[in-house]
Each structure stands twice: as structure tokens, then as C-alpha cells.
Amino acid sequence: MERISVIGTGLIGASVGLALRAAGFNGEIVGWNRSTEGLETAFAMGAVNRKAETREDAMALCEQSQIIFLATPVLAILDWMQQLAPRLKPGQLVTDGGSTKLEISELAKKLYNQKDTARFLPGHPMAGKESGGAALAEAELFRNAVWLFTPCDEETTPLETEWRAWVAKFGSRVMDLEAARHDELCAWVSHLPQMLSTALAAVLEDSFADTQELRAIGGRALRETTRLGASPYSMWRDIAASNAEPIAKTLSALEQRLAHIRENLRTPELREEFEKANRFRSTGPETPAAGKHGEVK
Amino acid sequence: MERISVIGTGLIGASVGLALRAAGFNGEIVGWNRSTEGLETAFAMGAVNRKAETREDAMALCEQSQIIFLATPVLAILDWMQQLAPRLKPGQLVTDGGSTKLEISELAKKLYNQKDTARFLPGHPMAGKESGGAALAEAELFRNAVWLFTPCDEETTPLETEWRAWVAKFGSRVMDLEAARHDELCAWVSHLPQMLSTALAAVLEDSFADTQELRAIGGRALRETTRLGASPYSMWRDIAASNAEPIAKTLSALEQRLAHIRENLRTPELREEFEKANRFRSTGPETPAAGKHGEVK
């Protein structure tokens, strides 16, 4: 790989640029970002060393890149996939960092990975922060994080192998999953915690916005369970839209469980629920001791 | 105060003993605990310097104490209140650290605070850990924590003033609340986060007990939202039973909010929920930067 184009130089895209440099990549890193400010920040910090001036310029530079890394929100990734497919050739690799994978994988099967097209390897680094933006980017963002791939087929090309090797050099643990399974598991471990934290913070805002007492009394339990409530809609709109069914299933399951607990606050059935929860927290391997940021999502 | 009896030398009771010593109290601290082991631990660490041998011995020593601190779970506090009331006299003060206050306050109004009875001042230190027991006790447990009182009447006695002064010396911020309001607010900031964490961990245990993938992928979001799932039923049974209605109300409200989000994963209504949650996290004074343990509950 001599040139990589990073489409979307936000937190993930800019961190990939920094991580590539830290891992010894000395080719060209082209960046494009919808907001000029984000691109300037990424350029100033050395995450990219060439700026695409326009969307068309970015497309043209993608044509001259071995690898194209799509790091926008999911719906924009789908759009870029469609724009790029007819302009790319066999021997090029497109990969991404989108938070949901089924829609991306389905589209990739249609537009890529044919005899006369570029390859597409869907990916998802399980790293992030509550806020986005290039200003928060770090070369170490992916260290100790899991980087998931949901390959579209059995085939693998030398560029795919090279990209996986770079990801390993970022310090990530690489893991392959089937796309639908990815979306189901991420609904449970990431999207459901987000929605319940948003729900809890929203209902507290409705009931207690002006109540100093609530905040004076609240401690770590309140702080932790509402922390993700700070996440902006802009980061979650596409995830919710592109993974609606799996997320809805997890929400239904949690609603039912909460209702069950509500109906059994005075019965021994409550013990069952606590004991199940205790087992979840105590059995099996603990959530890995993730690095500084590899754990934020 | 020359002698205080601590009934229940678990985490809270033993920490009160240690905090009293650290604050300069040099009178006698009598301890009683249902399990001998817990009492021996509290004695060995200097949290109490006299052990009641039997329940009857403990009662007799309470008769000779100026202050009696009840630090058992709520239902046992109610039991001790009834056992002690006929044996105590005006000029003695009973206070407690129970997690719910309405039932305790109602009983206190019946059995205490009369012309010919002892006084009762209901209290609740907002400090704790996921696990209990004397072995985890610390003199600093209450530093920077809020210590709530729900006084039964307008009157205050010199012993009550003295107890409040000791609590202030422990490093706690003292705050008075009406008992029903206490239980309502604690349902929101403490009991609801516990129940939702238990519910989430329990539903994950049902669905993914044997799935290594889930734990491999899960990061901070999963870890934080299920952390309280480790809390044992024994610590929560009495809270759930004695505060069932307020907790049920918070659960209903959260269930409805989750359903609302579930029905709006693809609509702009989701933005409203995120923005409300953002406001809750960003407006008003942030949850106070609590001390090492004053924040755990």
C-alpha cells in the first residue's frame, strides 16, 4: 500500500491516520471530510498529509488509492459505496469502520467482490468516545480494542491481509463475525446500553430538570447509568436506523424484564433475578481489561 | 455521649465505629451482629471495643447507651425499633442508616419522640459498596458523601445535635428531607439504576450465558450498565419490599420511555429523546465529585 484515502476524518478516521503513522506507514494518507474544519484539524495533527479539496477530488484520489477507508456514519458509508463502486477497479480494497454491518455487507455483496470490481471488507473497531471529532483523535485509540470484520465471502486478497496486519499493529484484537450476528451482538452490548442510558436521562430530565436535590443525592449509580446519555443524536441516528430490528428486540426484552421485576418487588422471584444478574457478572471471562480508550463504546 | 451501641456491624455499622474513632470519640463503642464472624472482624479492626454476646446482652447495653445506631437492613431495623422502644427512656437517641425511610419514620412517630420515650432520628448515609461486610469498612467511607436525615418532627435534642456534629466530622454533607420525598428520590437515583442493571445483566445471562463473543465485544458501556448487577439480593430485598410503590413508579416510567424509543428508532422523535438526555447530563450542577467511596451507591 502506497496511498490510502480516509473518507471522514472524524474521531475514527483521524485516529486511523495517526495509528498508521505510529505503526510505520510512510505512504500518502489522503483525507476528506464534509466539514473543512474537521479536515484541517486532521491535517494539522498529521493524521492525513493530503487534503481532498472537494467531494469529486476525493473520488478521484480514491481511484488512485490501494485502500479506501470509509469512516463516516453508516448511511453516508452506504452512499460512498455506491458512488465509488463504478469508479474503482479490481486490485483496490474498500473497508470501513461503520457501527452496523448488515446493510453495508449486503450492499458490498452487490457492488463489490465481483470479478471486475474492487474488494470490500466490512469492519468495525470497537473503540470510540462519547464525543466525536478529529480533535479527540489518538494513535492509541484502538489499542486493546476488538476490531471486528464481517467478511462477505471466503476469499481474501493480499491487500485484505495487509489491512488486517495494520489493524493488528494498531494494537487491536481482530475478530471475524457474520454480519447479522455482529449487529445482534452490538445491539446488546452497545446499542441497548446507549438507549437505556438515553431513556433514563431523558425521563429524569422530564421529572427533575429543576430539582437540585436529585443531583445532590445521586452518586456513582446515577452517574454511570446516565453517562451515555451525553452521546449526541448525530452519532446514533444512523445506528438506530440501520439496526432498528435488532435494537427493538433488545428493548422489548429489557422492557419485559423490568416489568417482571416491577411485579415482583415483594416476592421471592426477585431473588432469581438478582442471582441471574450475579452470575452474569461473575462467570465466564470478565470483559477484557481494555486500554485507555478501547473500552469506551 | 459516652457510650454508643452499633447494632449490625456490617459495612456501614463498622465504618461508623471507625469514623467515630478517627473523629476523636474515645467513649465506648458496643457492637452487636447477627453473625459472630462479622462482629469479630469489626472488633479486630477497632470499629467496636466491646462485643455484645447475645441479642439480649445487646438490648441491655442499648439501655445503657446514650446513642443507639441501627445499621441492619430495613426490616431488621423495624424489628429492633419495636424491641427497643419499651426498654429505652427519654434522653436516649436511636438513629439509623437504613436505605428507605418512610416505614421507619412512620414507626418512629408511633413508638418514639413522645414525652416518656426515647428520641428517634431517621438517617441514611449515601455511601456503600457493591458488597457489604465489616471487612470492607473504612473510617473514610462517608467523606464527601451526603448523609440524609428525615426528622419526624420539628424538635431537636442536644444528642441529635451532637450526632449531626459527629456525622459532619465524618466528612459527610448533612441534608434534611421529608421521608416520603427521600424514598421517591432514592428510588430514582439509586433503586431504579440497581433494578435496571439487574434486569440487563439477568436478560444477558438468559440469552448469552455461554457466549464468549458477547464478553469479548463488550466494553465500558456493557461493564458500567451491568456493574450493579453484582449486588447481592440480600442487600436489596428489604429496600425493594419497603419502597415497592416508588420503585414500581420509576420502573413503569422507564418501561414507557424505552417503548417510546423502540417505536421511534427510525423517526425524528428519537432526536428529542437524545436532546433531553443531553440536557440532563449538561445542565445544572454536575453530580458532586464524590470521594473514594462516597459515590458508590
Image: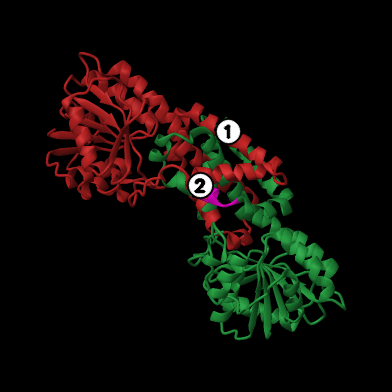
Chain colours: A green, B red
What is the span of residues highlighted in magenta in the rendered image?
A225-232
Q: Main secondary structure of the magenta part?
A: helix
Quarter where residue A263 is shown: top right
Please state which amino acid type lies under the numbered disc 1: Ala
Q: Is residue A238 left or right of residue B246?
A: right
Quarter where residue B155 is shown: top left
> Considering depth in this image, is B164 or A204 the residue closer to the camera?
A204
> Considering depth in this image, is B173 or B134 the residue closer to the camera?
B173
Residue B168, percent from left and from top: 23, 39
Q: Is residue A243 left or right of residue B61?
A: right
Please state which amino acid type lies under the numbered disc 2: Thr
Q: Which mark is residue B253?
A: 1
Point 22% across, 21% down: residue: B118
CA–CA distance in space, label 1 to label 2: 16 Å
The numbered mark 1 sits on a residue in which chain? B
Q: Is residue A280 above or below residue B158?
A: below
Q: Is residue A232 above or below residue A6?
A: above
- Is A227 magenta? The answer is yes
Look at the numbered disc 1 and give the secondary structure of its residue.
helix
Point 31% across, 28% down: residue: B122
Residue A12, percent from left and from top: 60, 67
Q: Which residue is mark 2?
A: A225
